[in-house]
Amino acid sequence: KDSRDFFCCVANCKSIVAGTSSGKLVYYDNSQTIDKPKAHSSAIVSISSGKDVVATGSTDGFVKVWNASMKCMLSINLQALRISGQISSIHLSENQEKILLGSRNNELWELSCSDGSILSENGGPITCFHSSYSSGLSMSPNGCNFATTGDDGFLRLWNVFDHSEMKSFEMGMPSRSCAFSPDGNMIAIGFGKPVKENAKVMNGKWSIVNVDTLTIIAERRDTRTCIVEMKWHSRGERIAVGSNDNICVYQIFTKTKPATNVEISLLTIIEQLCSPAIHFDFSRDGKYLQVNSQSHELLFFEAGPGIRIKEASRMKDIIWDTNTSTCTWSVQGVWGDDAEVTTLDCSIGNKIVVAGTCDGQLRVYQHPCISHSSQFSVHKPSNGAILKARFVPGASHIVTLQHNAVIIWRNEERNEDESNVITLYQSSFPDSDNAVEDGDENDVISTLMHHGQHRSTLTDDVDVPKTFLLETMKMIAAFGTLGRCNSCHYDASGEIVYPISSTCVLYSSNLNQQSLFQKHNSQVSVIGISNSRRFVLSGEVGSPRILVWDSQTGVNIALLSNSNAVGVSQATFSPDDRSIACICADGYNRIFIWKTLNGFWNDAFLCSEALAGVERVYFACFADFTSQENSLITGGKNHVHFWEEKDGALVLSKGILPEKSANATFLCGVNVDGKLVTGTACGSLVLFEKHAAMKAIKAHNDSVLALKHCPEGLVSGGIDGYVTVWSMSFQKMSSFQVSSSLSRLSRAVCSLDIQIDTRGKSTKNILAGTGCGYICEISKVTGRIYPLIDNHDGKVNAVVFNPISNEVEYATVGDDMTIRVWNAKLNRTIRLSTPGMLPLTAVDWSSDGKELLIGCGEVDGMRSEGKLDYCFMILKSDDLSMVYTGKDSNHGISAVKYSPDNKSFACAYVNYKICIHDNSLDTKYKLISIANKHSAVITAIDFTVDSQWFQSMSFNNDKEEVICFATESGEPLTSSSKLKMLEWATNTCICVPSNNVGMKVEDPSRIVPWCSQLSKDQSLLVVCNDSGHIELYKCFDERIDKRMFRAHCGTISQCVLSNDGQTLITVGKMDLSLLVWDLRQTVPEFYMVAK
């Protein structure tokens, strides 16, 4: 019956709290009603309740916190905190310590419930957007950033990958258009609104702003109407500015580098339009413009004189710099009978077309899209017209702009021939339309993925029959040694990039997941990342191939190859990301310089080459681009060389070394504020100025292997296992020990990278990688070390799956004397133990899953010293505690196996004999029998289902030798007819046919099979050979299908299938890697990244 106007209310247990338009706060419960007439001076628009308190927000600019008796505990004046805009929503955190505040300026703030202070690190909103209509959108050429402008008079720069606002610039006037220059150093901004509100709004004015300093470096005004579109030519020499009455074409002259002084001259004014121009594009050579107007005209003009070209046929062979015009021949199929197309963009290479409509639909097509019946996929993120849709350079993401929202989509291209369509799924947003419409399922060209999901793994297969019926085999994880210096880096999204064998891994520490780039044919020898952290280069051993690929999509962009090269030993990006220097691993250390003109590396070309000499080169880096343009520096044994590019040739200037360093070996180098700092094999840092060594300091107790420039100065890492931060004056600021548990060579820090805080003024984290594959993250502020990736220190000798675990667990043993139990779903070690002081060579899991049998032995035939010399050990699987140790020989163990009934186990020694033991602690695992008929080292053992017989395999001169023995006596089975009747519990011995599956490995002399595994249902056989390939054989009734995958570089020493046959693990003998494969077919998903 209350006649007051209530704006908001909230239920709190058995009570209700309501706010009125007059600012009163009313409290209702079963027994009483309490009015607070002076809660606020104006309307209460939002209320949030916790367990004991209530928070209110009002149009008077105050947020107040009330206790259970409706007494005010805290009053927050938003004006004092410089928070502008009226309150639209507030929310109390569950622990009642924080208040989330949303304003009508599209800002989100986090405030403290105790004192009302702002909780964000930078003292600003945790997220924000334009407070009024926004329609200006432009992509930075670096592929990492984009800019937006709006009627609120702000230019905002955003990061594509972490979705954060990087910078903002108050322009003082509304703007509805902006455009990055081709080099990304400048951005043009057009001002005005269709309806001029006051004299301060100068319609038709436009400015050029320096991106780094956000200062205006040039201005122009040649029209008096609102500017609606701007477009640079790719060379940066011309810009077209479109307003409501004409298009002005200007010539741009940049007088300084970096750009601080720009001269603008007007070339022509195009006025032959029936309505305002809304889309236009330059031709590739900059001579022509194609223009779309609001009346859907398609017109062509000469960009210089501004003369209209009436014969459209003259334009049919013209290549356009961009394709954003909605009414052109190649995209006419995007127009249907339903909604008007308001914006359009084509990816680089014109493979994909994205179009936005007036009713908020986002459509994706293949290019060219000529027919109105063209297949497409459509998604409607929210109501309202899509004003702009643009591909990020490289097509890794798509950014769409509506009048009050910017939405980022992630794009993942797929290479499957069987599906070529894009399908879009929407993340759940409370204010969005959930309608999803899909196009035809035969035309998927790309994948838009949620940022929390991972990229599709690109598998490489060999000679695959089209009728092959096996499930898709996909590598899902890779572990191993890094091996090379400077081989792990942060990418643009904070993931870690590093090489394992022929695979490049992108590891997300937040999700604990790996994405894999598998386009190399041999072992990756070098990996580098661009300064924008967008592009990755990776080179191969023994091959002249360098691949440049997108770190966000895993899509290969360019192949850099030269017939004169042999292999790649060093490679690096230039500071502007437009050059790559490559050092070849031949006798002359050839240098190749590759360049790109557009900055996306799809137009890469060889620019220059030279011979560095016969002395080994250990590092290569470019000089600081602002001080020594196109200067390359190489260093190695007894030399530091400075190279300058002149007329396509590299001119050598030798570095001047002091007498003490004349015979030094320079292992790494980096530029610090235009000066070269190198690390030497004796542990010193040497500073060079103008090609001469000026200063040397002792930095580490052993060789310096890695250097990285940071805001504080320099970070160094050495063989001693320490990471040290140095100031600009080379004073030690802090030092961290990576791991004291690793051996001397294994803890050597061979790779460094840094993460900079959001302000760009200090180092946040340091990424350190060691040669054994141990990667950790060091917090520079707290000094805490967070292990991210931990592998075996050296070779992995054996793998076995847990036979009964619901989780997919497997155990590994290696030369580092450790046993590790892994979770295949988490891709991490969950238990680790060092049971002795000997290398561990073999492992097996008991059939009840309670114990692990481990064999100790020799490393490459060399005996080790230790009290447990050459023995077997039994551990509890739950905590890896020791149960028993035994010894039957003075030689090492090569293989172990439990019987299916768990009553016995076999240990094969390198002296060719097999010992069978009773699996009972009561009998102290007594010896039952000995089999000694082999003439080579035994590599595999299988028991029959009834545990009465076992077979073992050895290699002798690349020929397999398989013998069957009786478990009780150790006598060999000589009857071939009885052998055929035996049913085996496992089948790891090569070329032993199963009576259930009649399959046989093809021609063993072609490629030597090294290990095999048959699934439990005996429908899938995995055979691995010494060339690093995996062969899959699958039996369907009487037909056998085969598929081959490239997996490792060199011999695969072991392969193991999980109990369900869905996970495969392979171990490389030469590349020291362990790879995890998923044998199930996966379905791609498509999600919105951010809104």
Image (cartoon, grey):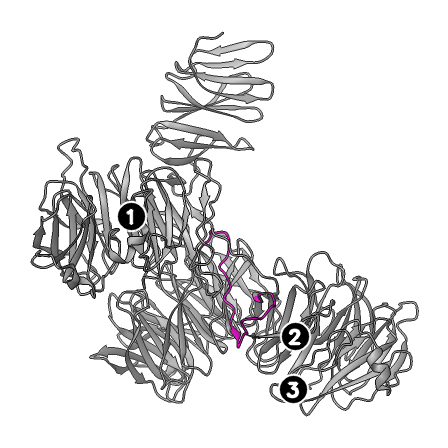
Q: Is residue 458 magenta?
A: yes
Q: Are marks 2 and 3 in contact (CB under 8 Å)?
A: no
Residue visible at 74% across and 72% down in the picture: 843
Count residues near mark 3 (Cα–Cα under 10 Å), then give few for <14, some for 14-19, many for 20+: some
| Residue 819 in view | no
In this rendering, is residue 528 above or below 300? below
Look at the numbered discs 1 and 3 and tell me whether their residues touch, using CB distance below 8 Å: no
Q: Earlier in the sequence, mark 1 or mark 3?
A: 1
Q: The residue under label 2 is which amino acid type?
A: Ile
Q: Which mark is residue 1040?
A: 2
Element marked by disc 3: loop
Identified by mark 1, the residue type is: Thr
Say how many tags the image has. 3
Residue 508 appears in the figure: yes
Q: List the residue tagged with mark 3.
A: 1004
Separation of marks 2 and 3 at Cα, in angstroms: 17 Å
Give the left or right position of residue 956, taking residue 559 as reference: right
Q: Quadrant of the C terminus?
A: top left
- Disc 2 vs disc 1: which is toward the camera? 2
Mark 1 = which residue? 343
